[in-house]
Image (spheres, grey):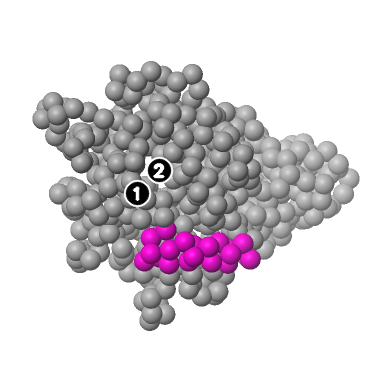
Amino acid sequence: MTAILEINTMVWLGELSTRYGRRVTLGEVPGEVWDEITLPGIDAVWLMGVWQRSPAGLAVALRDESLLASLRQALPDLTPADIAGSPYCVRDYVVDESFGGPQGLAEARTQLAARGARLILDYVPNHVAPDHPWLTDRPAGLIQGTADDLARAPGDFHEVSGRIFACGRDPFFPPWRDVIQVNAFSDELRAAAVDTLVAIGDQADGVRCDMAMLLMNDVFAKTWGERAGPIPDEDFWPYVIPRVRARHPDLLFIAEAYWDLEAALQQEGFDHCYDKRLYDRLLHENAQSVRAHLQADLSYQRGLVRFLENHDEPRAAAVLPAGRERAAAVAVATLPGATLWHEGQFEGRRVRPPVFLTRRPKEAVDEPLRDFHHRLIAAGAAVREGDWRLLSCTGWPDNDTHRNLLAWSWTTADTRHLIVVNYSDLPAQGQVPLPWADLGGSPCRFTDLLTADTYDREGDGLLDPGLFVALDAWHCHVLALEG
């Protein structure tokens, strides 16, 4: 199981520079800071946005009034120096010199490895910047248009060095004006993608692939039609991933994925895919909806990334009441699969800075929430070992609040853990039959890893009718069994 912490590299280094009164690059981050981010239970760090950003893309983006309004909303005292361009408008897959260049990144990876943590970096497969080298070196690997296209739809195309290129897009939104669309059906583009990912694998232990589903043959064909040319016999990712793994067998592939294509992307070679469906259920639905989601095949669930935040989603503290946020975090931290945490989430930050910004507003730290998350991350690491099982909860004819309880167990040869979450805004009671048949005839002690509270029970009743649980609204147990 992998627990990943996402860090906005530019903002983070800027704040460290202010903290230490000197310029701090990736190669100069103090050891105490690496210790701070590699909390017990965090075993991978995603340094988001380390690659060279595009001045040409930035110039285009700055003409977008809606973007500028979003920047001012996040940072009311915005100045031109605060806008650096998008990390997903990549000019070249070379670490920006302002971050310390490749040597600085190599030192960061060394520091993380010394603390048992892997380094994850971005790859943006769907598009490149208007000044990316491929526009001159590999134009056949990009979607091209004509002068008529540019005249008819100037917002959808760019002219660069006498050629017309299509702006990047997904099929449900207008084009992104600051980027150029690659052609996923092009042999030249696929070879370039392999080379790029091999180079990333030389520098990192994992790669998070932005909007990975856009490159799938059927999606790409629906988006681009005849402009893309004939559909290849082999899909994009089954072509690319094995060729990269021939050089980097252990490189972790993570897909940002939507539209219920997670299982398909797992089949195409990804280790983990975003679990956006669980995110939506935790934010907007109830315990029954979450329980139904968790009935999916376990091998599929192990390949999911559970999260409540990332740089594309609102801050959890801004959209979830405090109790619900904690209950959802307990679920995310203790389910099978990978977990993704977002720097600032533990402290209760409420402002999600757009990725164009070099800094974010100051916010007060929610100390109790931070302490809770630190305990939870450590507990999640202790719990998520062995066999996972979704458990049933039962109630009584005159009390059906057990429907609001979620419960699951983790079992190894030496450890047993039980998680129970009241995912509702009302008190809930129920009985949870435990899956350990040898409990009968002996006393058992449960210790809650979040509170250190202990509960002594006789083993006979834990199997039938089960452990009685009474939880206030949004409260949880993360229990270790001694017996």
The residue that label 1 is drawn on is 90
Of 50 and 321, which appears nearest the observer?
Answer: 50
Is 220 included in the stretch rendered in magenta?
Answer: no
On the image, the x and y values in percent for residue 10 come to 37, 62
Where in the figure is residue 131, as x and y percent of width and height?
A: 27, 47
Q: Main secondary structure of the magenta part?
A: helix
Left or right: residue 361 compared with residue 1: left
Q: Distance between the residues labelled 2 and 1?
A: 8 Å
Circle 1 packing at 10 Å, graded few (<14), some (14-19), many (20+), is many
Callout 1: SS? strand
Residue at the limit of the structure toward the left, as seen here: 151
Q: What residue type is labelled 2?
A: Val
Q: Give the range drawn in magenta.
A: 95-114
Q: In this view, does 317 lie above or below 313?
A: below
Residue 107 within the magenta-colored segment of the rendering = yes
Q: Is residue 403 visible?
A: no
Q: Does the CB distance between marks 2 and 1 fall below 8 Å?
A: yes
In-image side of 112 versus 445 (left or right): left
Q: Considering depth in this image, is 410 or 66 the residue closer to the camera?
A: 66
Residue displayed at 29% across by 23% down: 227
Label 2 crowding class (10 Å Cα cut-off): few <14, some 14-19, many 20+?
some
Q: Which residue is drawn at 51% across and 34% down?
A: 240
Find residue 432 and report its image quarter.
top right
Q: Residue at x 30, y 41 (%)?
A: 136
Give above or below for 143 relative to 121. Answer: above
Secondary structure at numbered mark 2: loop
Circle on res. 124: 2
Question: What residue lies at 38% left-to-right and 76% top-to-bottom?
Answer: 23
